[in-house]
Amino acid sequence: MAFGITFENKTNELKTTLTDLKIKVPEIESAAIVSIEGLPIASVLPQEIEEARLAAMTAAMLSLGERVAQEMQRGELEKIFIEGTYGYIITTAAGQNAVLTVSARKEAKLGLVFLDMARAAQEVERQLT
């Protein structure tokens, strides 16, 4: 018999945080927590999105974004924002070693998305420590 929090319990707790975020902001279609090394930690994704591939692409965006921010003397990277024809992909820090990435439909109110993402990222940071 094991005591304490298991990896599975931690993953379920993180997935609950992601699900709660999607409930608060219905325009959010997917959400993932990814390590800064590009490894998936937890996600709530549509079936057609491969978790490992999203994690790797998120890490690549993060690396490039950090280099651009440094090169352009904009300070520490805080958020990556991509706008496409059908919506947005937003990545923000969730502690020192992870990021929260979401995709949202075009009709999403970005202020609310950013606010609820910030709250979720703080919760994820707490859960990962």
Image (cartoon, rainbow, N blue to C red):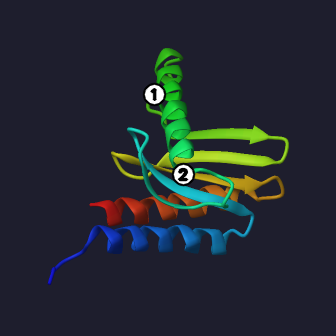
Of residue 73 and residue 20, the one placed in the foreground of this image is: 20
Percent x, y of residue 60: 51, 31
The quadrant in which residue 111 appears is bottom right
Question: Compared with residue 93, is residue 37 higher up or lower down, i.e. above or below?
Answer: above
- Which-is-in-front pick, marks 1 and 2? 2
User: What's the mark number on residue 75?
Assistant: 1
Q: Residue at x 64, y 73 (%)?
A: 24
Q: CA distance from mark 1 to mark 2?
A: 30 Å
Percent x, y of residue 115: 59, 60
Q: What's under tag 2, amino acid-wise?
A: Glu
Percent x, y of residue 41: 41, 55
Label 1 crowding class (10 Å Cα cut-off): few <14, some 14-19, many 20+?
few
Q: Quadrant of the N terminus?
A: bottom left
User: What's the mark number on residue 45?
Assistant: none
Of residue 86 and residue 51, the one placed in the foreground of this image is: 51
Q: Is residue 27 left or right of residue 95?
A: right
Residue that mark 2 sits on = 51
Q: Residue at x 57, y 72 (%)?
A: 19
Q: Residue at x 34, y 46 (%)?
A: 97
Question: Compared with residue 68, is residue 52 higher up or lower down, i.e. above or below?
Answer: below
